[in-house]
Amino acid sequence: MQLIAIKQITGTILLRSGLHIGAGRDTVEIGGLDQPIIKHPVSGAPYIPGSSLKGKMRALLETSIFFTRPDTQKSVLEGKPCECGRKDCPVCTLFGSHQAPKDCDPDLGPTRILVRDANLTPECEEQFKNGRLPMEVKYENIINRVQGVAEHPRPLERIPAGTAFVLSMALKVFDGDKVEELLQHVWQGLKLVEMDALGGGGSRGNGQVRFEELKLDGEAVDLDKVAVFDHK
């Protein structure tokens, strides 16, 4: 397979509500957070891992746009990602196959979409360095249905709404690829993330985002014109 182009997708990820992408921890300190967010190990600044955005795009596309494909539908109903590894599968072509290489179609080729970690925009990075971008702590509870009171409060760290990150993605194009079709799936994936949520606790108000100043090789892209549920 011959690589014929690498298209650059850029923009800004704007948080419209607090975002929680957990770092996980082996121990919980007394009085400390039991659900901290992931941060850069050197600067301590929050960021959005590329794997989080890529995984959410894939999951949403598999349960909507690609759900009508027999292989994808079977995997989704089993709670797994598509594993067919076939060249004619847009899921495996765009995002990569979960099959071992020996079980994949030899013509499938490498993963087409590359999603980079999203770091703070220069403006937000400056605010963070000057102490004007503190992380917030949201307390979540379990409601006792009989007594009508909140129980077991647990602190959840979030990046506050209004924070912006740099979106940087790339689409590798090989000879024989249907580039416009692949790009349409990328736009649909981003649109679905806007309509759903990113990170943890989306059903509880976390992770509402908007992709702004979206561009493909410097040309503006309007996500508002992207259709995602037109299955006719």
Image: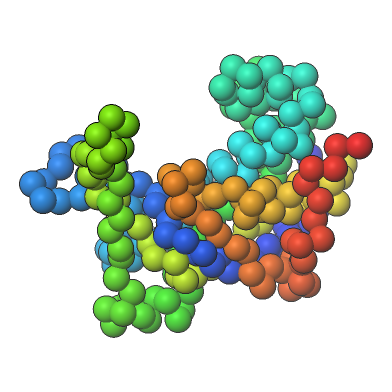
Tell me how many marks there are.
0
Q: Position of residue 40 (x, y in %)?
A: 33, 60
Q: Nearer the viewer, residue 74 or 102?
A: 74
One can see residue 110 in this view = no
Q: Residue at x 46, y 79 (%)?
A: 122
Foreground of the two, 1 or 17: 17
* Residue drawn 49% across the image and 43% down it: 203
Task: Look at the picture and state if 183 lies above or below 15.
Answer: above
Work out whether 80 lies above or below 62: above
Q: Is residue 181 above or below residue 164?
A: above
Horizontal relation, residue 186 to residue 197: left or right: right
The residue sitting at 30% across, 46% down in the picture is 140
Quadrant housing the N terminus: top right
- Image x and y of residue 82, in percent: 65, 26
- Could you tell me which quadrant the C terminus lies in? top right
Q: Is residue 60 visible?
A: yes
Closer to the camera in the image, 102 or 30: 30
Q: Residue furthest left?
A: 30
Colour pattern of the rendering = rainbow
Residue sticking out furthest to the right:
232
**Image vertical order of residue 76 relative to residue 224, above or below:** above
Q: In screen coordinates, is 2 left or right of 142?
A: right
Where is residue 147? Give x, y as percent: 24, 34
Q: Position of residue 57 (x, y in %)?
A: 62, 44
68 or 112: nearer the viewer: 68
In the image, what residue occupies the spot 54% across and 49% down? 197
- Apparent side of residue 14 relative to residue 22 in the rendered image (left or right): right
